[in-house]
Image (tube, helix red, strand yellow):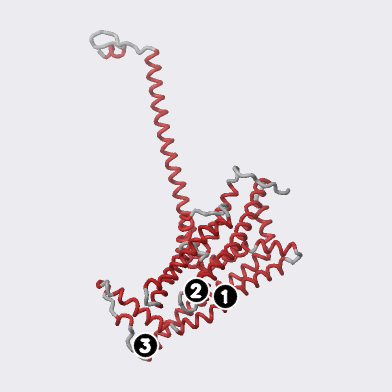
Amino acid sequence: MESDKIAGKRPGGAAVPEPDGSARRASSEEYRNDADASEMVDYATRDKLDVATSWATIGIFLTLALMGVSAMSMILIPVTLAVVVGMILGLAAEKLSKLGVPRVLNAVLLSSAVALTIFLVINALAGPLAKLAQEAPDFFQRTSDRLMPYLDRFKWLHISPETFQGSPMSISTLLENSGNVLHVVSNNLTPAIVQILIFFAALLLFLAGRVSLRKTIIMAFSNRTSRLTAIRIINAVERVLGVYFATASLIYAGIGVAMTVIAYVGGLSVPVLWGVFAFLSSFIPFLGVTTMTIALAIAGIVTHSDLVFGLAPAVVFFAVHLAVENLVFPAIMGRQWELNPFVVFLAIIFWTWMWGAVGAMLALPLSLIVMTVIDELFIEEKAQPQLPG
């Protein structure tokens, strides 16, 4: 029987048929197909793992970058603000250079103009703020008297007139609270002074070395096409920021004047202060007008006994701001620099979370920069200007 097996026969004596050539080829092809399918599955699995690894690496990098931006906020906030302001002043710097003004003197003049503007704004606000501080006790008392009838309707709040009244304070408690206030003020005042100094130093140096910095960025690219793209992007960013904020400043100044008139006619105290706040808040889309409208509504309700008359300044200001933003601004600026409102809102929320109030002010300029860079990088559909070189 062992010999039968070796001879290729069955135990009964019948020969075991040998597989023919077609069967062997079919078996070989089936094996190869199975091997190819297994190899394709391995490749697909490997590709998915590579994609997951790439996204994980990008996520880790972004997380570390955001942590770095948040940790270095004390330095990055004034430096970023100085760069944005310097790029906004780029058109003015070019005109002064064409008039033959040296770059260093150019930087000194523009930085001094910025410092003078800030000083004049602070000086203009000093008087109204001092008056408002003097009227603060009466204002809070009127606020309590006016809001209590509305708050009484919400019994679950457990708010009574005694909630807004403080008990007599002893000398020791007063000194202790004064010490705490001074400690908080000193802790916040010192970083603010340091950031102001960093801002002006960075602005001066940026304006003085603006041309050489442009050349360094352009020459960092190896081929002519990339250099022309860099030139086009830098010029476009400076032009967009300069024209946008020059035009926006004039339009928002008109809103500030209108707000001053509205506050004066509406019987609100310190109308000039309301006008300045309306001008500054207009540079923060959505949040600025919302904050101003709520503040006007509260001030109007506190000032006037009639609810309709008290809400009138807030309603009029909101209507004026809405008309300017949706009719006047697009008519003057056109649609070329129109930003997606949802993207701008997300940018404001993100930068406010990262850098606070200054981040909210920088959200729109940074969005304009990103939008301009993307437009210039993907410019195939548009007619490209012929650049020298």
Residue furthest toward the left?
A: 12
User: Residue 179, relative to residue 338: is it above or below?
Assistant: below
Which tag is nearer the camera, tag 3 or tag 1? 1
Return the x and y of residue 23 as percentages of the image width and height.
37, 15
Instruction: Estimate the spatial distance between the alpha carbons at disc 3 and disc 2, rounded to whole Å.
Output: 35 Å
- For residue 173, the mark is 3
Secondary structure of residue under mark 3: helix
Numbered badge on residue 274: 2
Hey, which quadrant is residue 301 in on the image?
bottom left
Q: Position of residue 16 (x, y in %)?
A: 30, 11
Q: Nearer the viewer, residue 299 or 39?
A: 299
Give the Cα distance between marks 2 and 1.
13 Å
Q: Which residue type does callout 1 highlight?
A: Val
Label disc, if present, on residue 121 of the rendered structure: 1
The reply, left or right, for residue 344 in relation to residue 112 is left
Element under disc 1: helix
Q: Residues within 10 Å of mark 2 (few under 14, many from 20)?
A: many
Q: Along the polypeptide, which appears first: circle 3 or circle 1?
A: 1
The answer to whether one can see residue 67 in this image is: no
Q: Residue at x 73, y 63 (%)?
A: 97
